[in-house]
Amino acid sequence: MTVRAILEAKGRQIVAIEPDTLLASAAKVLADRRIGAVLVLSRGRLQGILSERDVVRSIGEFGAAVLTLPVSAVMTRNVVSCRQTDTVGSIMELMTNRKFRHLPVVENGEIIGVISIGDIVKSRLREFENEQQALQDYIKTA
């Protein structure tokens, strides 16, 4: 299975904020949308990614006053991305080894979606369920 299949199942919606968005506002976006990360874009170009972990880590390190800073002060700047043709196995390995849960999907320099570790788990579960059903159907006809 590929990243393309996951995007086709979940959709290609992208939630993004500007680098000068206050951290408190960004945290509200995360909570309101019930998501774990937002892309940080400036004039359509990827500048970083802000995750729940980034928010919690910055509050733990600097206190609540950090909520008045722009997300550019705490976001992850060196964003790792994937392509539609990447396999689920390679993405799982990448996310596990690098310890992150969200990956922008980029094709020809354009962001076309974001996948999360939860999206990957859901796709793998569907895959296992389909395999199980196929085996049960095979056994019934054997």
Image (tube, rainbow, N blue to C red):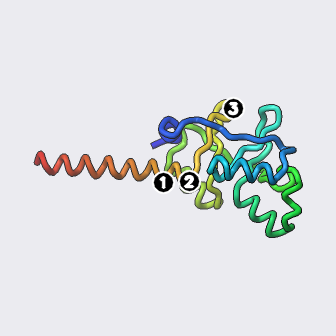
- Label 3 and label 2: CA atoms lie apart by 21 Å
- Residue 19 is situated, as x and y percent measured from the top left of the image, at 84, 44
Horizontal arrangement in the rendering, residue 4 relative to residue 139 (left or right): right
Residue at 26% from the left image edge and 48% from the top image edge: 133
Q: Amino acid at mark 2?
A: Ile
Task: Classify mark 1: residues with Cα within 10 Å, few (<14), some (14-19) or many (20+).
Answer: few
Residue for badge 2: 117
Label located before the other in sequence (3 or 2): 3
Q: Amino acid at mark 3?
A: Glu
Horizontal arrangement in the rendering, residue 61 relative to residue 98 (left or right): right
Where is residue 42, by image quadrant?
A: top right
Residue for badge 1: 121
Q: Which mark's residue is nearer the viewer, 3 or 2?
A: 2
Task: Classify mark 2: residues with Cα within 10 Å, few (<14), some (14-19) or many (20+).
Answer: some
Looking at this rendering, what residue extends furthest in the left direction? 142
Element marked by disc 2: helix
- Residue 61 is situated, as x and y percent measured from the top left of the image, at 83, 69
Where is residue 85, by image quadrant?
A: top right
Q: Nearer the viewer, residue 1 or 117?
A: 117
Residue for badge 3: 110
Question: Quarter of the image containing the N terminus?
Answer: top left
